[in-house]
């Protein structure tokens, strides 16, 4: 069935032409519209269709092969590990990130890490970075810290208000991982592109190996250190727990040794400890544990305090306890009372006031009854004052010594000013520090700063490389750390979501969603397909609606044309200058039904033949043959070209047939030479009525007879009778 294009005129008077399933452009080249050009166009179109079909099949098959190959690579990497699959969760996640598009992202440049890129991974967080990016990052950090170290070297320290020199702390020169902030030394700046296990320089890309892997056994020492090495193939991320088997007894050492995995060296049997606890009454009911690690007895009972005045329900392990009651019993002196807090009865002891005592300054010691008070010795106190530099010069006294009254010259913290002040008073000036803080952007402005300026407490506020968030760290030098937030990339229906580093969402393709597309169909068909990002695929079903163009009983058999992309050129467009190029306008519109191309049997006007004909052109027409119907004369047929008749089955003369205009050409009886004067007719002809004169036998007279009567008779005697005149014959008889 041939496709025919239809024209649609829009509101601007521009004619839009589109072929169902194929876009058409007005004003096309008509140079190759001949038979040869059409054949060449059909060949090229067929090649393009085959190439597109092959590309679609290749794309689908390659996607399947990629899934299969990824699974096979995972199996080959993990074939040396026979542990529990739950232990491999983190390692498996790093493997998936190495394969998924957009999952492995360099946090410095916010760019995707490809298979062919040179990378470096952190030994702590195992995050991937481009080798060039991490080198630039490390060199910038080291350069900033060296400049700061040079500034610190110019002022090696400061003096306190006591005149003590305090050396300034030297900032160590290190650089940090952008992800986990793990510090590295200058000698640890990566210079080479190594595989994950560090055995191979510049590992080559192999389709059946993990990207950036050498494909050999990892052989790194496992953590916690057990003496075994990793048996996986060279892989990203941390090594999984040790899968080796060892013989180990349980924690309580009561059971026989078992063969267990090295990563779980300790195991417990199901027997109870049954060891006497520290309370001396109960036994430990805990299941297998390390010796001498029994928990305190947790059984509760009522216990009295040490003085016996109060009782509480407490754990058995806390049976000995003190309440807050002061003893208050009188000593034997009868003057003083015990000031100790809850203690066993009878343990108050002697009165502490009756023991040997010294004067307040501690220079003289004497023994006196508890009723007497020890007097001061009268000597100078000489106790060390709180300042630490002077002693108390008052006479021996009771109570605390007062503040140091010595007048000394004190320097402020910044060391710029000095003043005579009592020793116990501190001196700070009003001079503001003009030294820059560690951020090298803001001034300290702290009054009387001792030179050890505090870190800058202002927020950085710079826009991070992601372009969406501001740096919330304190003001700092060098580059800001990458944004540590995650952005969500959703499919069109928002049901399938993946997380990528912030700032990468614009360059990351939406995840492949296997749920059905929820957008309404643009045509009257149901077009089931999976969720997608671009426009819905073109409906490939048949229209199947009533064809209002042909208005026949057949449904439209053309490809659905409810939403067809039409490109057209506005004929009224005028360029503003010689550089303007006329744009093509595209529009999705509904095209009218094409003419019905279903073949239907059509008979010619005269009913001579019936052939299949397109429905839209199924009109009876002349076949070009002669009518061939028997005329009324019965001798001839209608020679008129095939024409319309009322009854196609009746092969006799009808109204539209020509009348027979020939005369009768039937043979007359033998001897009659006169033609039939009637028009062409059925048998028989009328008898010939022509009168014929002839001589009689004797030749004396003429005999007149009708031709039809004479030759119609087959009797020779009758003819002889008609030719006789009836007279006597005058001829002589021959002898």
Image (spheres, rainbow, N blue to C red):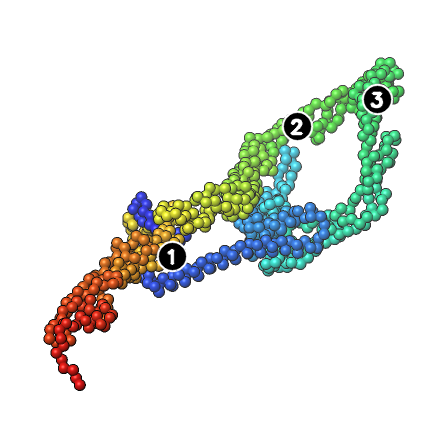
Q: Quadrant of residue 336?
A: top right
Disc 1 crowd rating (10 Å Cα; few below 14, some 14-19, many 20+) is few
**Mark 1 and mark 3: Cα distance apart in space:** 116 Å
Q: Residues within 10 Å of mark 3 (few under 14, many from 20)?
A: some
Callout 2: SS: loop
> Which disc number belongs to residue 423?
2
Q: Nearer the viewer, residue 702 or 223?
A: 702
Task: State the CA–CA distance, disc 2 to disc 1.
Answer: 125 Å
Give the mark nearer the N terminus: 2 vs 3. 3
| Residue ID at (23%, 68%) | 713
Q: Residues within 10 Å of mark 2 (few under 14, many from 20)?
A: some
Q: CA distance from mark 2 to mark 3?
A: 54 Å
Circle 1 sits in a helix, a strand or a loop, which is it?
strand
Q: Nearer the viewer, mark 2 or mark 3?
A: 3
Residue 3 position within the rendered picture, expressed as x and y whole percent measured from the top left: 38, 54
Foreground disc of the pair 2, 1: 1
Q: Is residue 372 left or right of residue 96?
A: right
Q: In the structure shown, which secondary structural element does the residue marked by tag 3 occupy?
A: strand
Q: Is 695 or 48 nearer to us in this picture?
A: 695
Q: Which mark is residue 698?
A: none
Q: Tell me where residue 370 appears, x and y as whole percent.
A: 85, 17
Choose mark 1 or mark 3, whichever is in front.
1
Residue in the image at 81% along x and 38% along y: 287
The residue beneath circle 1 is: 612
Q: What percent of the width, then of the height, locates residue 650?
A: 32, 55
In this picture, residue 603 sits left or right of residue 250: left
Q: Where is residue 555 shown, x and y percent of the image?
A: 41, 48
The numbered disc on residue 304 is 3
Residue at the extreme bottom of the image, as rendered: 735
Does the residue at mark 2 contact the one at mark 1 (Cβ under 8 Å)?
Answer: no
Mark 1 touching mark 3, by CB under 8 A?
A: no
């Amino acid at each position: 069935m041939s496709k025919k294009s239809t024209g649609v005129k829009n509101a601007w008077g521009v004619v839009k032409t589109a072929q169902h399933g194929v876009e058409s452009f007005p004003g096309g080249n008509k140079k190759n519209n001949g038979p040869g050009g059409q054949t060449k166009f059909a060949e090229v179109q067929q090649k393009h269709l085959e190439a597109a079909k092959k590309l679609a099949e290749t794309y689908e098959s390659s996607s399947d092969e990629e899934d299969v190959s990824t699974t096979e690579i995972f199996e080959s990497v993990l074939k040396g590990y026979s542990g529990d699959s739950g232990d491999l969760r983190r390692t498996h996640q790093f493997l998936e990130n190495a394969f998924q598009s957009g999952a492995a992202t360099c946090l410095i440049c916010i760019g995707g890490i490809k298979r062919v890129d040179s990378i470096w991974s952190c030994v702590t967080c195992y995050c991937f970075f481009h080798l060039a990016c991490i080198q630039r990052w490390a060199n910038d950090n080291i350069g900033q810290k060296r400049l700061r170290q040079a500034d610190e070297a110019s002022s090696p320290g400061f003096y306190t208000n006591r005149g003590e020199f305090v050396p300034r702390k030297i900032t160590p020169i290190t650089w940090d991982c952008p992800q986990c902030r793990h510090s590295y030394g200058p000698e640890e700046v990566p210079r080479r592109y190594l595989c994950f296990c560090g055995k191979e320089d510049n590992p080559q890309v192999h389709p059946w190996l993990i990207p950036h892997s050498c494909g050999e056994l990892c052989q790194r020492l496992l953590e916690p250190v057990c003496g075994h090495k990793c048996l996986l193939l060279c892989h990203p991320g941390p090594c999984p727990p040790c899968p080796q088997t060892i013989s180990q007894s349980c924690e309580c050492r009561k059971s026989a040794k078992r063969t267990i995995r090295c990563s779980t060296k300790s195991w417990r049997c199901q027997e109870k400890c049954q060891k006497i606890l520290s309370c001396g009454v109960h036994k430990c009911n805990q299941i297998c544990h390390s010796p001498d690690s029994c928990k305190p007895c947790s059984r509760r009972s009522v216990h009295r305090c040490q003085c016996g005045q109060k009782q509480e329900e407490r754990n058995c392990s806390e049976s000995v306890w003190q309440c807050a009651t002061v003893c208050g019993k009188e000593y034997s002196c009868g003057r003083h009372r015990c000031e100790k807090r809850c203690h066993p009865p009878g343990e108050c002891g002697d009165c502490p006031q009756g023991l040997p005592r010294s004067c307040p300054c501690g220079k003289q010691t004497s023994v006196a009854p508890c009723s007497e008070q020890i007097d001061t010795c009268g000597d100078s106190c000489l106790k060390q004052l709180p300042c630490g530099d002077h002693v108390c010069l008052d006479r021996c006294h009771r109570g605390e010594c007062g503040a140091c009254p010595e007048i000394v010259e004190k320097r402020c913290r910044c060391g710029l000013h000095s003043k005579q002040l009592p020793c116990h008073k501190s001196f700070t000036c009003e001079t503001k520090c003009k030294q820059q803080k560690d951020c090298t952007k803001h001034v300290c402005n702290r009054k009387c700063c001792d030179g050890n300026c505090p870190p800058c407490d202002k927020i950085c506020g710079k826009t991070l490389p992601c372009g969406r968030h501001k740096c919330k760290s304190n003001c700092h030098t060098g580059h800001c750390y990458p944004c540590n937030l995650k952005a969500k990339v959703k499919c069109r229906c928002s049901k399938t979501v993946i997380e990528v580093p912030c700032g990468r969402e614009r360059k990351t393709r939406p995840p492949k969603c296997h749920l059905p597309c929820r957008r309404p169909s643009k045509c009257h068909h149901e077009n089931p397909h999976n969720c997608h990002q671009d426009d819905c695929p073109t409906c490939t079903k048949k229209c199947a609606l009533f064809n209002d163009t042909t208005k026949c009983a057949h449904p439209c058999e053309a490809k659905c044309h409810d939403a067809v992309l039409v490109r057209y050129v506005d004929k009224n467009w005028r360029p503003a200058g010689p550089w303007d190029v006329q744009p093509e306008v595209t529009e999705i519109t509904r095209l009218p039904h094409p003419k019905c191309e279903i073949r239907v049997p059509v008979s010619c006007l005269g009913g001579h033949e019936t052939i299949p004909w397109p429905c839209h052109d199924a009109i009876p027409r002349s076949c070009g043959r002669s009518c061939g119907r028997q005329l009324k004369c019965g001798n001839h047929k209608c020679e008129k070209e095939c024409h319309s008749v009322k009854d196609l089955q009746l092969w006799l003369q009808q109204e539209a047939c020509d009348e027979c205009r020939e005369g009768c050409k039937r043979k007359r009886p033998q001897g009659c030479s006169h033609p039939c004067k009637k028009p062409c007719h059925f048998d028989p002809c009328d008898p010939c009525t022509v009168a014929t004169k002839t001589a009689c036998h004797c030749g004396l007279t003429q005999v007149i007879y009708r031709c039809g009567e004479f030759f119609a008779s087959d009797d020779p005697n009758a003819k002889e009778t008609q030719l006789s005149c009836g007279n006597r014959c005058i001829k002589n008889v021959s002898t």
